[in-house]
Image: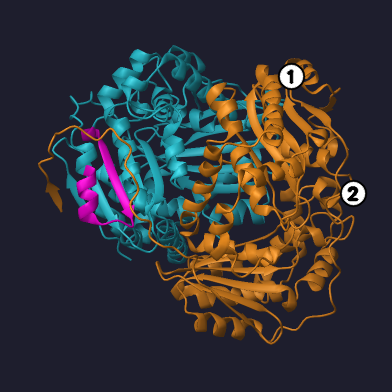
Chain colours: A orange, B cyan
Amino acid sequence: MSVVTTGAASSAPTKKPEPTAPRAYRFPSFVRRTLTNGVNIIVAPVAKLPVVTVLAMVEAGASFEPRGKDGIAALTARSMLEGAGDLDGVALADRFERIGASVEAHAGWDMAVVSLTALSNRLSDALSLVRDLVRAPSFPDREIRRLKEERLAELLQQRADPRSLADEHFARSVYDADARYAVPEEGSAASIRALTRDDITAFHVEHYQPRGVTLIFAGAIAVDDAVTLAGKLFDDWRGGPAPRAPRAVDRPQVGRSLRVVAKADAPQSEVRVGHAGPPRNAPDYFDAMVMNAILGGLFSSRINLNLREKHGYTYGAFSAFEWRRGAGPFVVHTAVKSDVTGSAVKEILIEIERMRTTEIGEDELTLATSYLDGVFPIRYETTASIATALANLVNHRLPEDFYDTYRTHVRNVTTQSVLKAAQRHLRPDALRTVVVGDPALVVESLQQVLGLVPEIVAVDAPEGGR
Amino acid sequence: MHIPIETLRLSNGLFVVLSEDHTAPLVAVNLWYHVGSANERPGRTGFAHLFEHMLFQGSANVDSNEHFEFIQRAGGTLNGSTWLDRTNYFETVPSNQLELALWLEANRMGYLLPAMTQQKLDTQRDVVQNERRWSMDNQPYGTWWERLPALCFPPEHPFHHSLIGSMTDLDAASLDDIANFFSTFYTPDNAVLTIAGDFDVVVARTMVERHFAAIPRGRGKPPLPDMEVSPSFGGARREIVPDDVMLPRLFLAFRSPIFGSDGYYAASVCSAVLGLKKGSRLQRALVREQQVAAEATAFTYDLTKGSDLLIVDVTARPDTSLEQLERAVHAEVDRLITDGVSSDEVARAVALIETELVVILQSAGERADRLSLFATYFGDPTLVNVQAERYRAVTVEQVNAFARERLTADNRASLIYVPREGAEAEPQSDLAMAEVP
């Protein structure tokens, strides 16, 4: 249906157009229910397209692992997909895939999640398979051994991947050796090798219990239908004794440090600078979040404009708070041409210091707040992103009206509260710097900029030098 | 599921696609220019992509960092990307900011050159060279998407050379190149503009006219050289790349029917039978049963000119030799040819693809991008509404016929990465093609 228009060739407007009146938006409404055994249900009916995402959230993340069993949470989650009831791993995968459903299972720092996406008319079949694998996984020994081998292969691959190396060394540099956050969520080579089927069974029995479970439905499904389905599949599930509480996860190391992971002839340096940050329940969460947006969270942030648009050192430079129940890291990350590594770190330090010493301009504040305010509806276009937002509520026990008041909270942030958040959460005296790069090109300038003697570590040092 | 679509064409040739959806107060603006690395002249590899970066550096009425800043301040997201034969620019903004997005896009389509300076070019050249280092040179296996097209298309073919470009060619790019490329390819008659989301069609048409109608039509772009290649490599090809990697990885490519053609859908289903998710043949056989591979997938590259590629991508387990890995992969492909696929396998593949087709259309940005794609390549955005049907129509016989015709031994190109140490035993071929009979 092509309409040819005349197209008056007058000149185009040169002046920036003004916005029209905004249309109201609310985060999709949702309801909560509880089954008799304590399983929580959250349903957000969104009828746009015939698809539903379901997340089964379990209090079974890496923070709950016993000492010496790093990686058991992730291995347990993945092993559940390898067989349940009468179905072996192949048959289980086949049952999901023949109805076009995607299922994944992984364990984060705090919670384990089984996520399912299916067309609405196949949801009932797909969710009954999820019931089987959550409640009655068979944990076949052969598949567990294979999953361990695959994790070891992945760790081996990371020896050659500068980004993974930088992330891993940064975590080890920020946290004390026995803090869980020092080791990757999915465990280290040594810890993985030691895990057994018995460990998995024990972890599953202890932590996969109805009282720790929330089922989140987002998509083309009515509340009553979701609750009925959940009740049919999960209400007869009975739990055992109360699980152990999580262990200490976030004890940080003290003071500044510099580590260079030696990768001779590296064409670029992977850089990480940061320290332990605030936990998600910090009272000044919104101030810290907006502060970070201005420092390095947005494309138009200070760090990115400085390192990329002003100096051309990098393809991108960003900062982030990793929000966890414990004190997750604050990190500035970038990859820069080797010969400017010291200069780039120097600019990062300058930007961190400037954030703490000088109040930001009103213009910078409104750039961040109007972005976060305006982009809010764009974040929740898909069933997966709505379900993930609800999972965030569950994980961090946020208030029910968190998403309804989010934009007001963002707009209430001020230049003074940003300065306070910067002074509280950015700590130049605690900055840990990790660079994966060519020592011949980076050590001298880094030493000069930071005034620290670098610890130089070989790439293939087992477990990142420990 | 049916997406509403309206189209119009301005007198300057700009093709406009409009798709309303009032679920949320947001709107996606998406522009495809029918130009990519295939249109680069010799000695200027990587230029189309460098040029894409320059389009974020302002225009006659927009200062250097303002493009990003205006959109972010409005509460929008934005980016651009360059591919072999197209370049796209897109933003999703609150619906009351639609005109801002259109104004910015029209400004850089119509009035870019006054804002171009040597300093901006030099900085973006540095940024792009760092992008190359980050995405390819300092990334295990990162050069595969440069090396594989080079292995699969002859040297004179427009898809042969590197999209991200060589450092030397990037160094050579000048402001004159910017001006020429702009006036040749960044013209309304070489573009598709899609608006998807919460807007009023009548209002949007008026806005589009106001901002785009005054931009003059182009003088026509030089035609691409002949893109046709034979449906088969006509002999196995093999290239071994010793690299900073820990495990061997094999990319096995087959020439296959171009995206959107009648044969494409059978090829796409065949790739899913082979390597989409856990129930696929490669994952069952190589990862789960034989345990020779740590990962195994297969997919189509979705090229729309000359030839598409079906690609099998398999990484060895630490205790697997390259020879074992290759033997196992070829055995699975051979088995597919001789035994054929089952109706269950086809049903599994189609069911997974169908779900994906729905899931991807949830966001206005993705919807706009798909509409621009079908409008750019086929002149018909409504094709987005028949993709599921096309997949459902694929038969076992079609998949088997595709396998027999295209997965043959003489239509296999192997790009193989091996750890640098221990690579001595393998015949090395650098970037040159090694023909193995």
The subunit carrying tag 1 is A
Magenta stretch, residue numbers: B188-208
List the residue tagged with mark 2: A178
Residue A309 on the magenta span: no
- The residue marked by circle 2 belongs to what chain? A
Q: Secondary structure at mark 1?
A: helix
In the image: residue B278, left or right of residue B38: right
Query: How many numbered discs sit on the rendered protein?
Result: 2
The spot of residue A138 in percent (x, y) is: 73, 71
Find residue B271 and name its label.
none
Q: Position of residue A21 (x, y in %)?
A: 35, 55
Please tell me in which quadrant of the rendered image residue B80 appears.
Answer: top left
Identified by mark 2, the residue type is Asp
* Relative side of B241 to A192, left or right: left
Q: Which residue is disc 1 drawn over? A: A442
**Measured from the top left, where is residue A326 in percent x and y?**
78, 55
Residue toward you, A417 or A93: A417
Q: As rendered, which of B230 and A299 lies closer to the eye?
A: A299
Q: In the figure, residue B242 lies in which quadrant?
A: top right
What residue is drawn where x is 51% and y is 80%? A223
Farthest residue, direction left: A6
Whether residue B432 can be seen here = no
